[in-house]
Amino acid sequence: DAMVIQNPRYQVTQFGKPVTLSCSQTLNHNVMYWYQQKSSQAPKLLFHYYDKDFNNEADTPDNFQSRRPNTSFCFLDIRSPGLGDAAMYLCATSRVYGAEGTQYFGPGTRLTVL
Amino acid sequence: AQKITQTQPGMFVQEKEAVTLDCTYDTSDPSYGLFWYKQPSSGEMIFLIYQGSYDQQNATEGRYSLNFQKARKSANLVISASQLGDSAMYFCAMREGNFGNEKLTFGTGTRLTIIP
């Protein structure tokens, strides 16, 4: 089945130690998104790629960066995780924007910062 | 101002009953889309149903239907014949913006618990 895969499902890191979260998709979608969801809150968009074009949300901290080396893969790098970065990180994809731009989500990576 | 408002933080419903989850939205964009997602305790966001702003008919997907009242800016989700597996967090979301600059904004969610 076509799907969005995130690895790892659970990640524990230490304060200030860089961490990379991975997302891959077999849907061949053009657009990939990264969201941060803190406990009992709505998901918050960090950034997204349309193909290789990167779009950063204005309030996304500089501590968060992303790479998309090809259509299938997208990475979220947290350069110096703080305690406030502990959250669920959700990757999503959509074929295009507009009326057919339904976003499909992966299972998420739950990040713990010690 | 909130763009998506879900006024029911939690709901308890008896199994097999129908349930309506409320969602109101605010936008000045004539072209937008409304979505409902289900998030079980495992964390994955599962797409349920979509309604476009120009769609004349209310969207339906199996047991899910979207009661779209454009003039009132509401997009309520109706789940018929609820099941225990429907227990989850439900998010209403709106897509607005121009091509290449679109954004999905989520409401705060409603936690639905189905009682046997």
Image (spheres, coloured by chain):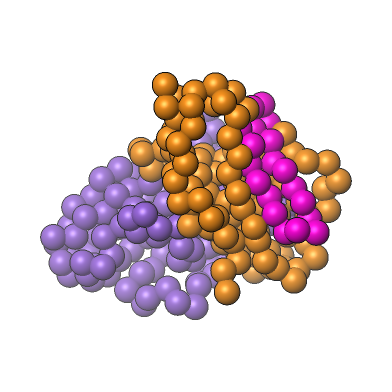
Chain colours: A purple, B orange
Residue drawn where x is 55% and y is 55% of the image: B6
In the rendering, at what x and y percent does residue A81 appear? 23, 67
Tell me: A14 left or right of B3: left
- Find the magenta span and give its range: B61-79
Majority secondary structure of the magenta segment? Answer: strand
The image shows residue A92, relative to residue B58, as above or below, that is below
In the rendering, at what x and y percent does residue A26 appear? 52, 38
Residue drawn where x is 82% and y is 48% of the image: B55
State yes or no: residue B36 in magenta: no
Q: Quadrant of the N terminus of chain B?
A: bottom right
The image shows residue B92, relative to residue B49, as above or below, that is below
| Residue A63 shows in this picture | yes
Along the line of sight, the residue nearer the viewer: B44 or B38: B38
State yes or no: residue B78 in magenta: yes
In the rendering, at what x and y percent does residue B23 appear? 61, 53
Residue drawn where x is 69% and y is 41% of the image: B66
Residue drawn where x is 57% and y is 41% of the image: B47
- Place residue B26 in its image quadrant: bottom right
Along the line of sight, the residue nearer the viewer: B83 or A3: B83
Tell me: A87 left or right of B36: left
The image shows residue B60, relative to residue A37, as above or below, that is above
Along the line of sight, the residue nearer the viewer: A58 or B76: B76
The image shows residue A93, relative to residue A17, as above or below, that is above
**Number of marks in picture:** 0
In the rendering, at what x and y percent does residue A59 appear? 45, 77
Q: Quadrant of the C terminus of chain B?
A: top left
- Place residue A53 in its image quadrant: bottom right
| Residue B100 shows in this picture | no
Along the line of sight, the residue nearer the viewer: B70 or A52: B70
